[in-house]
Image (spheres, rainbow, N blue to C red):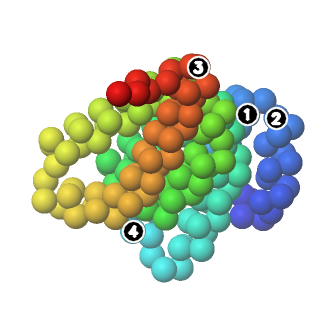
Amino acid sequence: MFSALSKFELSKWSQSVDTNTRREMLNSLTAAAQRWGFAPTEEYLLLVELLGVQMSTVCHATELCVLASMCARACVSATLPPAVLRHIVRAAEKCAAEVPFDQLGHLLRELGIIWWEARTKATESDIERYDAYAPHTAGLLLTLHRAFVEAAFSLSYTPEKG
């Protein structure tokens, strides 16, 4: 059903519904992507890619924090295909600038805690799986940090000049 919707139609739909409806859709899309786990077989790669594109399209600033946190937890448990996380980075690039400063700060802290706990409890096989998520996780953190700094500047937090 989801793959039949074009990016344009889904974008238009996501603008016409409320946050709760978008969150329900994002939960459904995430659950569908997790169905194939860390390493989907080749026959499902296109479907996983489409799910990622649709997640990025449906996500607005009001859903970004929940989606990023949910996907980080799925990555730690290795239930989300790494290709999907790339689209979460795109969603962050699209709408992180609209997320309030405090929410960005809380999200960055939460992501740090998620990955810190994962690192401290990691086994050798976990570390190998985490390597596949590393570039996308770094991209997500970079995007969120940039938006956080921009939000801080807009609140008149200027760096001290020495």
Disc 4/disc 2 C-alpha distance (Å): 33 Å
Q: In the rendered structure, which disc, 4 or 2, sits on the residue that comes first in sequence?
A: 2
Q: Earlier in the sequence, mark 3 or mark 4?
A: 4
Q: Which residue is mark 3?
A: 155
Q: Secondary structure at mark 4?
A: loop
Q: CA distance from mark 3 to mark 2?
A: 30 Å
In the image, 87: left or right of 16? left
- Callout 3–callout 4 Cβ contact below 8 Å: no
The one of 152 and 72 positioned closer to us in this rendering: 152
Q: Which residue is label 2 attached to?
A: 17
Q: CA distance from mark 3 to mark 4?
A: 43 Å
Which mark sits nearer the N-terminus, 3 or 1? 1
Instruction: Determine crowd level at label 2: few under 14, some 14-19, many 20+ residues with C-alpha closer than 10 A.
Output: few
**Residue occupied by mark 1:** 21
Asked if disc 2 and disc 1 are in contact, CB closer than 8 Å, the reply is: yes
- For badge 3, the amino acid type reads Leu
Q: Is residue 46 above or below residue 6?
A: below
Q: Does residue 150 appear anywhere in the picture?
A: yes
x and y, in percent, of residue 69 in the image: 45, 37
The percent position of residue 115, horizontal first and vertical second, equals 29, 42
Where does the image place residue 106, in percent across and percent down from the top left? 44, 25
Q: How far separated are the C-alphas under marks 2 and 1?
A: 6 Å
Q: Secondary structure at mark 3?
A: loop
**Disc on res. 39:** 4
> For the residues carrying marks 3 and 2, which lies nearer the camera in this image?
3
Answer yes or no: do the residues labelled 4 and 1 have beta carbons within 8 Å?
no
